[in-house]
Amino acid sequence: MSEEFKRRIKRQREDDPPLELLPRLFDRMKRGVWFRVLPTEDTFDDICDAMNQDWEDLLPLLIDHGLLACDIRDDVKNYMFKINTWELFQTTHRETLDMRRTPVRRDGAPRVWYICLGNPDYNNPLHQEKAIKQKEFAYQEFDSSSPKDKLLARELRAKAKEILLSNATARINKAKESKEKDEARDKVLQQASDPSKFEEAIAYSLALDLEREPRLDRAGVNEIEIHKRNQVNEQERVMILFTAKLWGWQDPSLTKRKRMRIAMAACRQVAYDYGHCKTPGYTMLPKWEAEVNASIATGIKQDPLSPHHSASTSYCDKIETKHPHYLHELYRYAVNAVNDAWNTRLSEKAFMNVYERLQNVLVMIEDDKGGNAKVEENRGKHFRKLEMPDASDESDNED
């Protein structure tokens, strides 16, 4: 093998990405020996001893890979063996580690998990413990620390610090988010207790322009797609109800006019946000709320806000589908019948009789000072033609 070829192979190996830290740690374990996963204080048969690493440094890495999970009960930390994750880890690194795992349950004690690399010298950990008692086997025989183990220890300690710092940062950020959510919730609850604080939002919603094109969302970022649908769907009805309730629609201290104004504002805001061209009827809110309350009380109607007739077919459409062009023919027949009656059957005398009767009715209403009693009293009776009062005479009398 030439020197150039050796240098090329060396450069190629240096360029290869290093293996993950955890597989390299497991690779330091003695093959054929069972090691318990979780350490105990009085034994030297766990994976930390097999790797020559500290448990405080190895634990964060095992948790970060999902091989162990921490369960805190009564301020006591318990670590659980995650079987599915171990199985995935074994499958991923089968060629390099050839790992096996097995549980051991002793009387009155919880289950203990052991792992072994390669073919085990003993069928199970219990047989291995029996060999230890018979002084045929000892873990201390493999307790040797090499320079490679020391390098791995420094790398593991740095990785553990990185994981702990990342977890601490995540907890701090989560606490901040939780605090911000709590503050936002408290602000909403505070505003809900004082409906006047929503006046700005109500006025803004009532001023939204439903004819604006293109229509941008209220943040002024994205364009809202406008549609021709008139009826609000279930989701939109829920939004209207929640918005109106938040703004004080059911506040008994407000006047009816103010509550109607809140309902109108909620409907208009939802119509704007969801691309409607018209504001839905705000008078439907009491009905929607009643249907929701009935559903809560009885459970009969599971979708109380769903517009059940939104997909129904009109009566005219049904006729047109069953009898095509029938309605058009009826319309043409009606037009011809009216024209025929107007041209051949109606006379000028008939129109004059109707006019005279109408004039008599108006005179009776005038005599009754706008009432209808005289009209009802003289219904069906024949009268001479009554004279309408002259409007000019009335104006002269008023002067």
Image (spheres, helix red, strand yellow):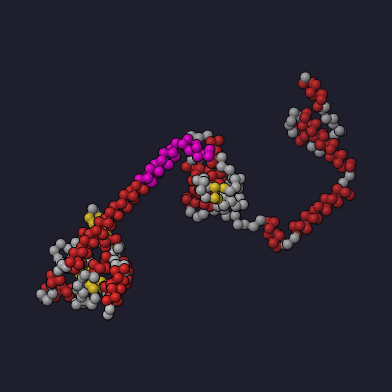
Q: Position of residue 242 (x, y in %)?
A: 49, 46
Q: Does the rendering let one see residue 291?
A: no
Quick check: is 203 in the magenta stretch? yes
| Above or below for 364 versus 115 | above
Q: Nearer the viewer, residue 300 or 1?
A: 1
Residue sitting at the far bottom: 1
Q: 185 or 163, which is in the foreground?
A: 163
Q: Is residue 374 magenta?
A: no
Image quarter (top left, top right, bottom left or bottom right) of the C terminus: top right
Locate residue 317, reporting x and y percent: 68, 58
User: Residue 133 vs residue 56: left or right?
Assistant: left
Q: Is residue 335 above or below residue 243?
A: below
The region drawn magenta spans 179-204
> Quadrant of the image for the N terminus?
bottom left
Count of numbered badges drawn on the protein: 0
Q: Main secondary structure of the magenta part?
A: helix
Horizontal and vertical percent position of residue 110: 22, 65
Residue 244 % position (x, y): 50, 43
Residue sticking out furthest to the left: 135
Residue at figure coordinates x 85%, y 30% from the top left: 387
| Residue placed most toward the observer, 309 or 119 | 119
Q: Who's the residue at 14% across and 69% down the image?
A: 144
- Residue drawn 86% across the image and 51% down it: 340
Q: Quadrant of residue 71?
A: bottom left
Direction from residue 287 to residue 197 in the image, left or right: left
| Residue drawn where x is 53% and y is 52% of the image | 234
